[in-house]
Image: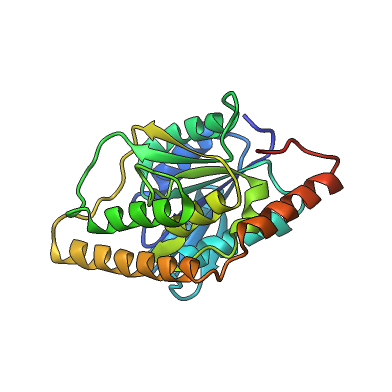
Amino acid sequence: MPAQLAVIVTAFNEADRLPATLAAVKAAFPDARVLVADDGSRDATGHAALQHGAELVHSPVTIGKGGVATLAARRVLTGGEPPEVVVLCDGDLGETARELAQLVAALDDGEGADLAIAAFARRVGGGVGLALGFSRWATRELGGVELRAPISGQRAMRSELLPALLPFAPRFGMETAMNIDAARAGYRIAEVELDLEHRASGKTLRGFLHRFRQLADFAAVYRDRRRGRRLDRRSIVARRISDRRSVGGRRGRP
């Protein structure tokens, strides 16, 4: 386990499940710096975060998952010496958040990944797969990688990735954009199947509206990346090489 590790837990109205999630995160990463990115919750999410020893990054209004996660990630990078590894997870994992330690292990496994993504071992709820299928296609089309779980919010990465990925894409587009941006920058992506559970949306009106919003955000990411508004791969790789040379030549990636 890396000596310096930060965990960013994104949450919106998760006061009921957040305490169990934070307890599990603490069990998995006893010495980690834990931040809760609260996206303008109207319940006691912020209070639960503070009561369980987490740093609270609170947006007074709802700005979307990508926006509030960006605030927390920037605090991680500017608050003294950055950690070696950053873990991202959702606040509704409950006690299954203990499984996230396996994501960090994937970063140090053999050749090692730069970005490890959790694929849920069991599917609970969900719709007809349109939003997921679009994200999978966009990731393959623009990033050149095939992912089983392209929209999973449970991720571990080397902290050196963050400057290339920030700001995260707005709202639910965060993970799809991260896949594409990391792949284009030449970073290695791995998926790890974990026995996780979360608050799933079913085939209800509310569930379908949620997935429609997801799909709209994924489409916005596709349009944005297709038009080349992010740094191209060559410029990011050049910056990585320059940064590594300046700190004494950390190991490179092909």
Residue lying furthest left in this view?
A: 204
* Count of numbered tags: 0
Q: Nearer the viewer, residue 171 or 136?
A: 136
Q: Quadrant of the C terminus?
A: top right
The location of residue 81, given as percent across then percent down, is 76, 49
The location of residue 92, given as percent across then percent down, is 36, 49
Left or right relative to 130: residue 154? right
Q: Nearer the viewer, residue 241 or 202?
A: 241
Q: Nearer the viewer, residue 9 or 194?
A: 194
The location of residue 123, given as percent across then percent down, is 24, 41
Left or right relative to 165: residue 192? left
Figure check: 156 above or below 37: above
Left or right relative to 114: residue 147? left
Residue at screen point 76% across, 53% down: 80
Residue lying furthest top in this view?
A: 110
Residue at screen point 60% across, 27% down: 111
Q: Is residue 27 visible?
A: no
Figure check: 13 above or below 136: below
Residue at screen point 54% across, 56% down: 181
Q: Quadrant of the N terminus?
A: top right
The location of residue 249, given as percent across then percent down, is 82, 39
Q: Could you say which quadrant of the image residue 65 lies in? A: bottom left
Q: How is the image coloured?
A: rainbow
Q: Is residue 231 visible?
A: yes
Residue at screen point 13% across, 61% down: 204
